[in-house]
Amino acid sequence: MGDIPTQADVVVIGAGTAGTASAWYLAKRGLKVVVCEKGRIAGEQASRNWGFVRQQGRDPAEIPLMMEANRIWQGLERELNADLEWTRRGNLVVFRDEAERAMFEGWMDHAKAHGLDSRIVDRAEIGRLIPGTTLGALGGIYTASDGHAEPAKVTPSIARAAEGRGATFLENCAVFGLIREAGRVAGVVTEKGEIRAPHVVLASGAWSSKMMAHMGLVFPQVWVKGSVGRTGPAPEVTGPAVWAGVALRQRQDGSINFAVRSADADLTMQMLLHSRTFMKLGTQHLRDFHFRLRKLSFDTALGHFSQTALERELVRYRTLDPEPNHKVLEGALAELKRAVPALGDIRMAKSWAGYIDMTPDLLPVIEAMDTPKGLVVATGFSGHGHGMGPIVGRLVSEIIADGQPSLDLSAFRFSRFHDGSDLSAATAV
Ligand SMILES: Cc1cc2nc3c(=O)[nH]c(=O)nc-3n(C[C@H](O)[C@H](O)[C@H](O)COP(=O)(O)OP(=O)(O)OC[C@H]3O[C@@H](n4cnc5c(N)ncnc54)[C@H](O)[C@@H]3O)c2cc1C
């Protein structure tokens, strides 16, 4: 057994985007927080994402959260005293087809209702945002107040700030399950021993469905693998983060992160178990998914049913680090060069992949559970959690310290998966 704290006010499971931000806000409220991370801080989705921080195109239920998150992002570097490569130069979607244009034109009603600065733009304006681009025949949508930030810097900087306020981060410390007493949470069992606490935050990203299965909670969640490439430094071609079939974000050093929407959907046990619930989403996005059976699918097949198997998987896969889909990335690079001829014969300097966790309606769960009391769930961010991280952390701290959140979280309740609610995804991004 390692030398770990035995008591805390709050234990957070997972030092990713949501868990680390929760720890930061909880520590600022003066609570004693211990974060248990099976691998390393920000090892999974938190450091592997594209870095977009957008209000644009969000599900109507997420818009108020993202508007508040945007306000937090504007002061976050100052607050953390850290460089996050935060830049507020907009988010641009270039329409791929008429269906996409119709969807975003419809979404503009929500933007107007919330007073967002999103607007439909024509080819000429797209040309001003990305000089020389071949994109934009069908127009696009642009939100100038959106931005982007460097994932490799954000969560580690928040963790450092949280440590500065007294939070403890334990890496290589998987949580195996909850300690319960009299129907409520009394702490967690970790691979290094027990930590007693009246509150536990479950922020375990792609692992949440398995973790919750052993807590008696059926959480429909699947993993899909997204691959990302990075070019070497280039002269500035875009300020906004762009989604145009190929996604691109130019970083501070001039290099460009790029990706395409299509993802590898590994056939895991979660996918089989929840296939009925995901049927609608699968049909909506069929052209974007390549279904595959991998070794990981077998290695992680039993963790849903057997506690021993779950424990084995958590320590075996300390940090999910899948091989990127090189073929998809080569296609994405070719598309990037076609879209932005000024890049000439730019090369790929680096690539990686990450497992994105998805729910059937592409919305997270952010809620204090009724059973067991003391458990707060913040997970299922469905490819949107980087931008939302800071507000999620603040809301979790409000749930625990104030007994209620300052924003309406009813759309993110866990019970929607089981009470016959319509689980159609409201947006396609
Ligand atoms: C390729 C890609 C592109 C993306 N692009 C964007 C984007 O542009 N904008 C955006 O907003 N979002 C984006 N996302 C999504 C975003 O990264 C995620 O929604 C967000 O990081 C999820 O945060 P999380 O805390 O829920 O999960 P994670 O950041 O994955 O953290 C979960 C952590 O929990 C740990 N853990 C799990 N189980 C246990 C356990 N039992 N004990 C201890 N630790 C445990 C894991 O090791 C992990 O570190 C993208 C994601 C990917 C992969």
Image (cartoon, helix red, strand yellow):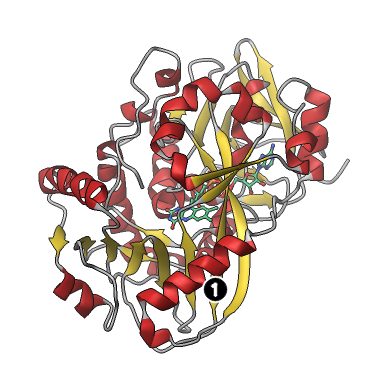
Would you say 115 lies left or right of 264 here? Answer: left
Q: Amino acid at mark 1?
A: Arg
Q: At which x and y percent is residue 186?
A: 65, 23
The residue lying at 41 percent from left, 64 percent from top is 247
Would you say 199 lies left or right of 421 here? Answer: right
Q: Quadrant of residue 237?
A: bottom left
Q: At which x and y percent is residue 364?
A: 43, 35
- Tell which of 305 and 105 is nearer to you: 105
With respect to residue 340, does 344 lie above or below? below
- Tell which of 423 and 101 is nearer to you: 101
The residue lying at 38 percent from left, 66 percent from top is 148
Q: At which x and y percent is residue 38?
A: 73, 45
Find numbered disc 1 in the image and state the secondary structure of the residue it sits on. strand
Q: Quadrant of the N terminus?
A: top right
Would you say 118 lies left or right of 206 here? Answer: left
Q: According to the image, label 1 marks what residue?
A: 230
Q: Quadrant of residue 174?
A: top right
With respect to residue 29, does 341 lie above or below? below
The residue lying at 34 percent from left, 66 percent from top is 242
